[in-house]
């Protein structure tokens, strides 16, 4: 029987965390083994920290249910260190208001999302690695306000919803839109 892959790895020990290709490779390997297709490598030592910094290693096919950080309000910044993602921003009712591609090493490589904005991202390239920053502390019950109009993670509807979102990024002419 295969070992269960955790949602998050243990943070590196000590007061200084050197970000290395070895550290990233470990997170990528764990994301490949994860049934969710992603794994968090926190750089902050505790859920109670007031600033959360993490690497998020992701594989295509992972579903991040559209959500916002509303109560308490938390902004979130994402920088693509490796790979490519599609970012989708939604209105309160679930309409798409913005979508764009972020690619490591390109002129569009990160995004800062204000508190209370519904968003998700889709993974467009294997072994994508994101650097994420948002305020802590982390409390599972209040960290994310999941969109009630979006399918739950793990559901059949989520797979179909994800396919629709990914298809929006299939052609370069459709990759960056506001409206």
Image (cartoon, rainbow, N blue to C red):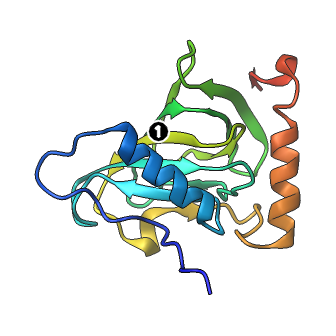
Task: Give the image location of residue 122, x and y in percent.
Answer: 70, 44
Above or below for 76 versus 66? above
Secondary structure found at label 1: loop
Above or below for 8 versus 163? below
Residue 9 shows in the view: yes
Residue 133 shows in the view: no
- How crowded pointer 1 is (Cα within 10 Å; few <14, some 14-19, many 20+) is rated as some
Task: Give the image location of residue 157, x and y in percent.
Answer: 86, 67
- The residue singled out by tag 1 in the image is 114
Q: Residue furthest bottom?
A: 1
Toward the viewer: 148 or 46?
Answer: 46
Q: Please report the residue visible at 62 percent of the width from the left and 46 percent of the height from the top.
A: 119
Task: Give the image location of residue 130, x and y in percent.
Answer: 49, 40
Q: Please report the residue visible at 77 percent of the width from the left and 39 percent of the height from the top.
A: 96
The image quadrant where one finds the N terminus is: bottom right
Q: Residue furthest top?
A: 107
Toward the viewer: 43 or 95?
Answer: 43
> Residue 44: which quarter of the image?
bottom left
In this picture, residue 50 sits left or right of residue 30 = left
In this picture, residue 19 sits left or right of residue 34 = left
Q: Please report the residue visible at 73 percent of the width from the left and 34 percent of the height from the top.
A: 97
In this picture, residue 151 sits left or right of residue 16 = right
């Amino acid at each position: 029987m295969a070992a269960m892959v955790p949602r998050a790895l243990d943070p590196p020990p000590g007061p200084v965390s050197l970000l290395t290709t070895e550290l990233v490779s470990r997170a990528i390997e764990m994301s490949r083994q994860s049934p969710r297709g992603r794994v968090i490598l926190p750089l902050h030592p505790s859920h109670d920290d007031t600033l959360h910094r993490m690497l998020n290693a992701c594989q295509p096919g992972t579903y991040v249910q559209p959500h916002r950080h509303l109560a308490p309000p938390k902004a979130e910044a994402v920088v693509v260190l490796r790979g490519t993602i599609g970012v989708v921003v939604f209105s309160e009712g679930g309409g798409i208001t913005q979508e764009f591609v972020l690619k490591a090493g390109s002129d569009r490589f990160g995004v800062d999302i204000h508190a209370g904005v519904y968003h998700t991202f889709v993974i467009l390239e294997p072994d994508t690695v994101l650097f994420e920053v948002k305020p802590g502390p982390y409390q599972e019950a209040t960290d994310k306000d999941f969109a009630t109009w979006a399918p739950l993670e793990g559901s059949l509807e989520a797979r179909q919803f994800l396919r629709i979102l990914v298809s929006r990024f299939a052609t370069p002419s459709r990759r960056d839109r506001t409206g």
